[in-house]
Amino acid sequence: MQREEFPSGVLGIRAHRDHVTPARVAFGGEANILSSRRCGAALQLLVTALLLQTAAAQYQRYYFANSLSHSVGSVYGSNAWATTSSSSAGAYLSAGPNAVDAPTSTQLTASFLLSIDAVSPPYVVLQLDVRDAVSGTVLAQSTIQRSDFSAANAQQWFSIYFTTPAAAANLEYRVYFVCCAAVVHYMTTIDACGGAPFQRGYAPPLMPHVTGQLVYGSVWQATTANSAAYAQYGPYVTDAPLGTTLTASYLLAIDNNNADTAQVASVDINDFDAGGVLLGSLPIYRNSFTAANAPQWFSVDFTSPAAAGHRLEYRVFSSARAALLIINTRVTQRGGSGPFTCPSFSATPSPSITSTQTASQTGTQTGTASVTASASGSLTASQTVTSVRELSVWALARGSRRARAGLGVGSCRCAKHGQMRSAAANAAPDAGTTAVDGCDGFVA
């Protein structure tokens, strides 16, 4: 077995001499990877995780953000990629890696580790998706708004669930920067989550409109000065599971909620290929809002068409009787309007941007005060790791010799060549690749 340390800090262990890029570490290989004598507690735990995952034949991939392609932002720390509040809107913070090795017709989950400078106002800042570059099909997508983060400058996982195509695919896991935030993308992981629900999200700037205008960088507004018409329609998607109860949720706000009780808007789900049959609708009155200028979710349950290929629209009609804001639209299978996170990530330690670095973000968005905060993070050797998945992510993110030495790794001898490496050597600062070439395994 060959051991490598990539410049990005990812520890790669492989059972064959096939090419492994710094952007991807594939768990797999022969069942008997190491000899019974293992090099220290950290390496032993990592190998145990690898063996368990191999036995389960579970497809898993890990991509640090800086190894992907980017249309906006800059490198952040050693492995992450980030935007600022002044970064160009409407571009991909991360895209790629154009993976061709995913199993066909398999249910997988893409999880993105992100942080943001501030958690209000609740405007959409990102849209996540999985796209097959061969067919041009978006297999899954979700919007992320500021309020989806539990805290500012804190790393948090967001997941989207998808099924790989039946034919060979070329998969991209993308983070689209909508507007106006200091966002950090740390890493993306791909694996099977199991039982994850259908979910989609649609950012207002990316939807069609008959009336209104873009405000605050990512919000659509229709006022009394605009005509009464659809402030949002489309996107004519055909990806809803057939004959399934779903919930369409619209995040809206209004300038005045007590001037009268007139109808100010309506939301609906339109089956375009059934001659405009409404699968669900909801009239919205001025006093349907509990407060003025306070974003509020309005949800409609509906059953998706039983026949394949029907194009669906998630529409918002403005009656031109108020200043109406359309902030977000989500469609989910489980009810509710919040984003989904794969359950096994709920307690996963987050990888640090580097072992010692502290970085600063400043973000502003129209209508809010400027927020300046510090974003830093690190994992210590004493931190509890409670599952195979947590161990794998932790070990990949903290795979430097420094971390292994902190766990008490002593001298190690290459089983093939008898070369010695001391704990002091393990603890030395990373400076390129210092792995023992051609080493098929380590023994204590």
Image: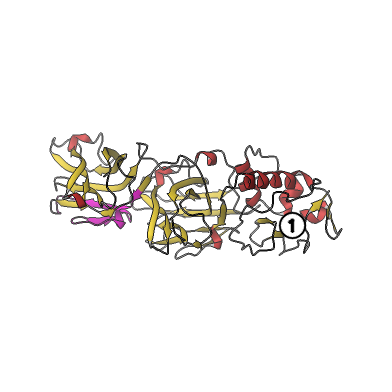
- Label 1, on which residue? 1
Q: Is residue 217 magenta?
A: yes
Q: Is residue 247 above or below residue 189?
A: above
Res. 255 image quadrant: top left
Magenta region, residue range = 201-226
At a point 74% along the width and 57% down the height, the residue shown is 1
Nearer to the camera, 372 or 99: 99
Nearer to the camera, 164 or 324: 164
Q: Is residue 205 magenta?
A: yes
Mark 1 residue element = loop
At a point 84% along the width and 48% down the height, the residue shown is 444
Q: Amino acid at mark 1?
A: Met
**Percent from the top left, x then y, of residue 122?**
36, 45
Residue 346 seen from this side: yes
Q: How is the image coloured?
A: secondary structure
Q: Is residue 12 above or below residue 305?
A: below
How many marks can you see? 1
Residue 190 is left or right of residue 180, and the answer is right
**Percent from the top left, x then y, of residue 366?**
34, 53
Residue 126 seen from this side: no
**Percent from the top left, x then y, of residue 27?**
62, 52
Nearer to the camera, 38 or 254: 38
At a point 30% along the width and 43% down the height, the residue shown is 251
Q: Label 1: few (<14), some or many (≥20) within 10 Å?
A: some
**Percent from the top left, x then y, of residue 44?**
74, 45
